[in-house]
Image: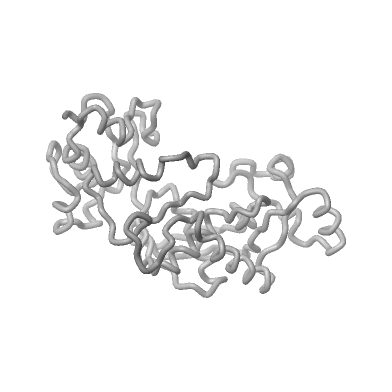
Amino acid sequence: MRVEDLDGPRVRPGLEARILEELRWLGLDWDEGPDVGGPHGPYRQSERGDRYAAALDRLRAEGLVYPCFCSRAEIAQASQAPHASDEGPRYPGTCRDLSPADRAVRGARRPPAWRFRVPYGPVAFRDTFHGECSFDVAATVGDFVVARADGVPAYQLAVVVDDAAMEVTDVLRGDDLLPSTSRQLLLFRALGLPAPRFAHVPLVVGPDGERLAKRHGALSVGELRERGADPAAVVGLLAAASGLLPAGGRAMPADLLAGFRLEAVPREPARIETRGTIAP
């Protein structure tokens, strides 16, 4: 269990404890984590800053990153593809080849973010669920941020450093993050770190086919718990949507371990009706 708490404004007092409590209510458990310890701690990203700083120093020393003084508005104005990627406009490389003198002038006005020098051409990999995949990071995203101007490491750098340090072998996540994999693989290679295997599965969507959200009337795990829902019914609903249990069944996570097969997960998003699907 790793707590990814680098996004300061979204980290509220008591939120971590509530999330862990709700996951345990669902019957999930973990062998390592902030509440149980383990050999790969600390397990909060906010406590792992020295590791991210060391990785950034290595990238700097090898000339694989550079300081960027552009604001988001400036990038949007300069970009010809304002919605090219999940990170917003493609970065046009404005600061990539600045002279030392220009960097000094711009640095006097604004602290820089740090961007990774993305090589040209597609980055290919094999996804356990999707098979052979390839994304041209240079064409769609451009040089991406690995450390913000306020010194906070970006998600891409933090998860790469942590996955390697924590000896993660397999990553299973939603397929909205499939394009991120190429960026992360570039960082694994640049830092000389072993990359895990990746599997990206379809998202859970609402009746309209869009990602399940509050606007669909969806309830959070905490709200379901407060309303007296049976955790076995919640897990059963998700298991049925994942092809692991017949519709209407009830189960706890431990019950599903013996029969789990990634091949059983449907290729299409799991469509869940939000009214009357889970009863106490």
- Locate residue 232 relative to residue 77 in the image: left or right: left
Expressed as whole percent of the image width and height from the top left, the position of residue 230 reads 17, 35
Res 62 seen here: yes
Query: What's the residue at 40%, 49% (across, down)?
Result: 175
Instruction: Give the tally of numbered discs.
Output: 0
- Locate residue 184 relative to residue 261 in the image: left or right: right
Expressed as whole percent of the image width and height from the top left, the position of residue 48 reads 51, 61
Quick check: 123 above or below 210?
A: below
- Locate residue 121 relative to residue 77 in the image: left or right: left
Front residue (pair 161, 240) = 161
Which color scheme is applied? one colour
Expressed as whole percent of the image width and height from the top left, the position of residue 224 reads 26, 31
- Quadrant of the rendered structure where residue 277 is? top left
Quick check: 247 above or below 95?
A: above
Front residue (pair 58, 32) = 32
Expressed as whole percent of the image width and height from the top left, the position of residue 42 reads 43, 61
Query: What's the residue at 66%, 50% (across, down)?
Result: 150
Query: What's the residue at 14%, 45% (across, down)?
Result: 251
Quick check: 194 above or below 27?
A: below
Query: What's the residue at 36%, 29% (across, down)?
Result: 208
Res 183 seen here: no
- Quadrant of the rendered structure where residue 30 is? bottom left
